[in-house]
Amino acid sequence: MEFEAPAVQLGAIGPEIALVTTALLLLIVDAFIPEGEERWYLAVLATIGFGVAIILAANQWGERELQLARMVAVDNFATFVKTSVAVFAVLTVWLSRDYLKRSEDEESEFYALLLFAAAGMMLMASAADLIMVFLALEIFSISLYVLVGFRRRSLASQESAMKYFLLGAFSSAFFLMGIALVYGATGTTNFYPGGGGEGIAGYLVSSAASDVDLLVLGVGLLIVGLGFKIAAVPFHMWTPDAYQGAPSPITGFMAAGTKFAAVATMLRLFVVVLYPLRADWRPILIAVAIATMLLGSVLAVIQEDVKRLLAYSSIAHAGFVLTGLIAANDRGLSGSLFYLATYGLTVLGAFAVVTVLAGRKERNVTLASYRGLFYERPLLAGALTLFMLSLAGVPLTSGFVGKFLVFGAAIQAGYWWLAVIGMLASVIATFFYLRVLVVMYMQEDDRGLQPAITGRLANSVVGLTAAATLVLGIVWGPLIDLAERATVFFA
Amino acid sequence: MTLDSYVPILFLIVLSTLFAVASIWVSSRIGPRAPTPAKLTPYESGIVPEGGIEKQRFPVKFYLVAMLFIIFDIETVFLYPWAVAYDNLKLFGLIEMGVFIAILLAAYVYVWRRGGLEWVD
Amino acid sequence: MTRVDPGYFLALAGLMFSIGVVGTLVRRNAIVIFMFVELMLNAVNLAFITFARMHGELDGQVLVFFVLVVAAAEAVVGLAIILRIYRLRESANVDDVNLLKW
């Protein structure tokens, strides 16, 4: 059998290689340094790794090609997602540094797993083959299973890790069966035509519409697997438990990064590759989106724990961003990208405030403990106010612009009723965001809630995300412009 | 496929059977014998067997060793297709596999330095 | 050599997958649940190999390697988590683990 070695351009996955190399370096360096020393260098090394990854990713802007045996797409879309994920991860590293400081949990594994998770999320964005999607998905999922259970002496943390793991493995099996059925129907797992194969996209163009039953069944199972990762109803059961039990910085990173990576894959897969099949996947996703928006918003209203409240809010937001995907037009694509980038920064900020108040012992996470926060810590309360308003979609915050874009795209595509349901869900959601504000401003408490973390890094993360939320809500032009240029796919 | 192609497999079966039988026979011949009660009890992976073994808890180290074994063992699965295609892949394949082994080695160094291979604390 | 209809293999894969789904949903012990998930993954492997044979190519068999390795990594992490719960709680029963409630 004649065989030709594939041309390997490792530069295509340069950012991921930078992250994985840094992670391995962290693990080995730390293993040789005696215990009991202050481990400031871990966070510094991780930050450098992400810095290199951001530079390498930014350098790929404007390129448009398939690399590594047509498994990896290098395009603006991937670059946009990769850069955003790296920024989320850097903020998480800084927040974690103050969270873990001088604790037994401050270990190289924490940062190394964060680097691995970010590498997997980045790979998700540029994966151009279903098996690459699966590998990327598992790289970040397995890292997150461990990170969720990182508070080793806390039973709640272990419990949430177990629930996340069991349901995650369950959904991976569905995703894999989806890949198998797509492979059975089309004879390929590659997205795009070329290189001697026609790819899934080419298959859909060339074949008659009558023999796609197996393919549609496979796509349905893919939706189950990806729907789990973005926490869409009815695959959301793990979300509140995992968010509550995980260390708070990790919860923020999960909400920001996992959602972005999984939706990025969905955008590439459904809007570009499976576009000819949209009559089949649209009804499924519409049902999922409506259930997700409504159930997420309604159940958040009755939550008493801030982390669970934000978990249900993140479920609702998965539904909002799905409306942009369902629109399946250019505005929907760029709108979803803008939405997820700004939502990520806002939700990271919200969890940063939670982290600062809760500390490593995860105390003061009930809504009642936020009573009178404004009178104790006006700046923290002000930042949290901004995040809540942005999540609710109030004008002059980035959340408003994002919602405006995705609902606008849905209306343009003729799904005005979906946009109306979305707005209705937003109104319900506003209720519980306001509830947090009422607790902070209207109710007094003589207990005097003090932040558990006073580190400068953690506070700067709160400041940076708050600034981003405000600035992107007023000067949204440049980021929308970038998001629009990012929708140049390799197609 | 002709029968000829099965000859190496037959050869391997005969050779491995011979080796296994010969090793047992040789060790029973030349090994010293000093039976003690401890040596005559059933082997249960190193712990003293008692009644109601199903109620007992195994030291966590057994799980650790099993996990390390699973993970390093399964990685070698990639060596087989590489070995089969080696003639076609040539230097490229060798370098790629070198990178793969280097990553595994990093994991090994990590496990070793963190005390994952120590039996006694 | 008689050729077995690949449909039978696919039916078997579907059956194994369904047993895995049902088992995951009805069983309570974390380790048993995880074994059912492994059964689902093996059903996927069987489907991959059958489809590879139907298409007359090797791609599907290559995919099985990746599934195997990822499943092993997942098993290691999963068992470690379950073990830790067991040490904190002395139980591997999913229903006994109930701190987190909505």
Image (cartoon, coloured by chain):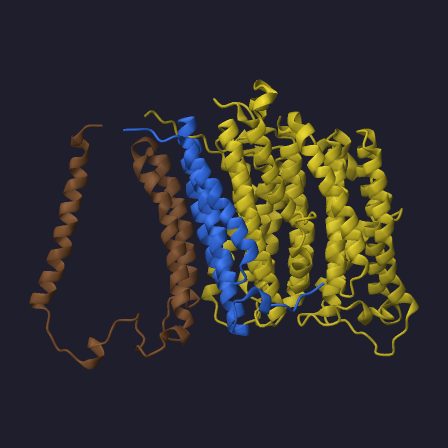
Chain colours: A yellow, B brown, C blue
- When the figure is inspected, residue A389 is found, relative to residue A99, above or below; the finding is above
- When the figure is inspected, residue B104 is found, relative to residue B116, above or below; the finding is above
Q: How many numbered discs?
A: 0
Quarter of the image with the N terminus of chain A is top left
The answer to whether A285 appears left or right of A48 in the picture is: right
| Residue A62 on image: x %, y % | 65, 31
Residue A366 in sight: yes
Residue A401 in sight: no
Which residue is more in the foreground, A162 or B92?
A: A162
The residue sitting at the left extreme is B29
Residue at position x 89%, y 71% in the image: A375
The residue sitting at the bottom extreme is B37
- When the figure is inspected, residue A265 is found, relative to residue A378, above or below; the finding is above
The answer to whether A406 appears left or right of A8 in the picture is: right
| Residue C93 on image: x %, y % | 54, 66
- When the figure is inspected, residue A154 is found, relative to residue A399, above or below; the finding is below
| Residue A167 on image: x %, y % | 58, 54
The answer to whether B80 appears left or right of A362 in the picture is: left
The residue sitting at the right extreme is A442
Residue at position x 82%, y 64% in the image: A380
Quarter of the image with the C terminus of chain A is top right
| Residue A351 on image: x %, y % | 73, 60
Residue at position x 40%, y 50% in the image: B102
